[in-house]
Image (spheres, rainbow, N blue to C red):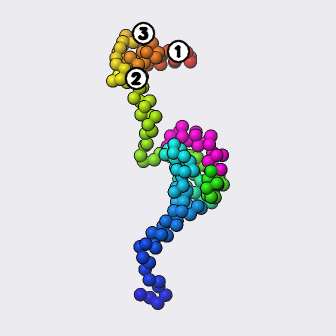
Amino acid sequence: MRANQEPASALGSCLEGLQKTWQKKGSLAGLLNDWKVIAGPQLSSNCSPVSLQRGVLIIGASHPQWRQALLYNRPQLLAALKAAGHKVRVLKIQQHHPREYKTTDSELKVWARHPSRIDVHGIAKCNLCGNPSSAGELEIWGKCCFCKQKELKEKNN
């Protein structure tokens, strides 16, 4: 060991140092640690801090609808970040595609009763074209999705 070299620190003190870094309010790690409390359960599971540099926080949204929610809630989110002790001056929001897509319960419920599912609603003949269609679509529109699409296209032209 060299004369000016300090002895190796114990693993416990290294872990304590890492824990302090995660609790530091000015760092991205500290912000990630507090994110679920600051943003709330729905926003935090679909949006996440990507970068924090010189008071500029970039938040990534997993879907355009969540990006829109962030844009609408920007002032409240910035106030919550400041109230939690994070030194954020500016919020920038961008589309961010996480590696793993998270499906919420509400999406599963919507899909479970979706009108185009023939395994749920059954099959029937379209009233206009006579082709087989989901009975759920026929119940809603009185025609299959292709006839409905054609009707909407004609309305817009």
Residue at disc 1, secondary structure: helix
Query: Mark 2 or mark 3, which is nearer the start of the sequence?
Result: 2
Separation (CA) of disc 3 from disc 2: 17 Å
Label pair 1/3, CB-CB below 8 angstroms:
no
Q: Position of residue 82 (x, y in %)?
A: 64, 54
Q: Position of residue 3 (x, y in %)?
A: 46, 90
Q: Residues within 10 Å of mark 3 (few under 14, many from 20)?
A: few
Regarding residue 95, the answer to whether it shows in the image is no
Separation (CA) of disc 2 from disc 1: 22 Å
Q: Residues within 10 Å of mark 2 (few under 14, many from 20)?
A: some
The three-letter code of the residue at mark 2 reads: Ser
Separation (CA) of disc 1 from disc 3: 15 Å
In this view, 61 is above or below 144: below
Q: Which mark is residue 113?
A: none
In this view, 28 is above or below 100: below
Residue at label 2? 116
Q: State whether the magenta stretch is mostly helix, strand or loop.
A: helix
Q: Which residues are magenta?
A: 61-79
Residue at label 1? 154
Left or right of 106 in this view: 56: right
In this view, 48 is above or below 126: below
Residue at disc 2, secondary structure: loop
Residue 15 falls in which quadrant of the image? bottom left
Residue at disc 3, secondary structure: loop
Q: Nearer the viewer, residue 5 or 156?
A: 5
Residue at label 3? 128
The label nearer to you, 3 versus 2, is 2
> What residue lies at 52% left-to-right and 17% top-to-bottom?
152
